[in-house]
Amino acid sequence: MHSGEEAAAPLPGGSPDGTRQFSSKEKWLAPGYFLVYLGYLFWHGEGELGHWGTMVLLPFLLVFLLNRGEGGTVSTALASFGLRRGNLRRGLLVTLALGVALGLVQVFLSRSGPAVMEAFRSGTALYLLPLAFVLMLAMAGFTEEFFFRGFLQTRLEDLLRSRTGGLLVTSVLFGVYHLPYAYFNPNWPSAGDWGAAWSSALGQGIPAGLILGGLYLYSRRNLLACIILHALVDTFPAVGLIKFGEG
């Protein structure tokens, strides 16, 4: 799968596979930021557009500014999240196969399943599928993967000195992140019920985090692979939620 690809250029202080040693400030920045952000979500709910500021732009700027004095550039900052030239095709075949399989499973598990099946029967899925995929890429697919895999998992691996530890802790935090939505969002069946919210958030978030984080490691920290997988998993259920011309 990786034959014919050029080796990725090593990052400052790191190895050719994109790993690097982060400063002590940067290693603690990630979990500290997560705790503050989680408190913010409980205090003030946030939509998909807001995620671009809190989960993408602000973490990126903090990382860039922390490393600017040591010769860090925009390219090296992006590479530390897993977006670097020469690595963006790694694991994509596995990503596509896994994404389609998990997306179809989502059709049968989500409440939008009947609407998705109707879209396939009527033929509207021909244009709804690509539309939903683009929307999912631009929303949770990019923002959540940039934050959890690109920002949190990489720094926690270094902090814990363990790839497995970083994967496990990030997966748990990915589940906890969904707790405010599971409790406060009326579109979640668990809304208003703490026990059901914990069960729903962790029950969905931890397995998803393990799969996405595992792919991140398998693809040698290719964040694009995780973004595409996340978007594919969400695409099929999203087809049943897209409505045109309905009041």
Image: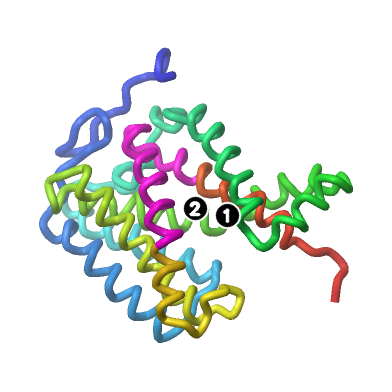
The image quadrant of residue 56 is: bottom left
- Residue 85 position within the rendered picture, expressed as x and y whole percent measured from the top left: 40, 32
Furthest-top residue in view? Answer: 4
Q: Indicate the quadrant containing the C terminus: top left, top right, bottom left or bottom right.
A: bottom right
Residue 189 falls left or right of residue 5: right
Q: Residue at x 60, y 51 (%)?
A: 106
What residue is shown at x 54% (from left), y 78% (from top)? 185
Q: Residues within 10 Å of mark 2 (few under 14, many from 20)?
A: many
Q: Nearer the viewer, residue 60 or 110?
A: 110
Disc 2, SS = helix
Image position, residue 60 (x, y; %)? 35, 58
* Residues tagged 2 and 1 counted as in contact (Cβ below 8 A): yes
Circle number at residue 138:
1
Q: Give the magenta-colored segment's residue range.
A: 203-227
Depth check, front residue: 135 or 57: 135
Residue occupying image coordinates x 39% and y 38%: 215
What residue appears at the point 25 percent right and 59 percent down from the top-left corner? Answer: 65
| x then y, percent, for residue 2 | 40, 19
State the CA–CA distance, disc 2 to disc 1.
6 Å
Q: Main secondary structure of the magenta part?
A: helix
Q: Quadrant of the N terminus?
A: top left
The three-letter amino acid code for the residue at tag 1 is Ala
The total of numbered circles placed on residues is: 2
Label 2: which residue? Answer: 142
Work out whether 162 lies above or below 179. above
Q: Image check: 33 left or right of 211? A: left
Disc 1 packing (10 Å; few <14; some 14–19; many ≥20): some
- Left or right of 20 on screen, residue 53: right
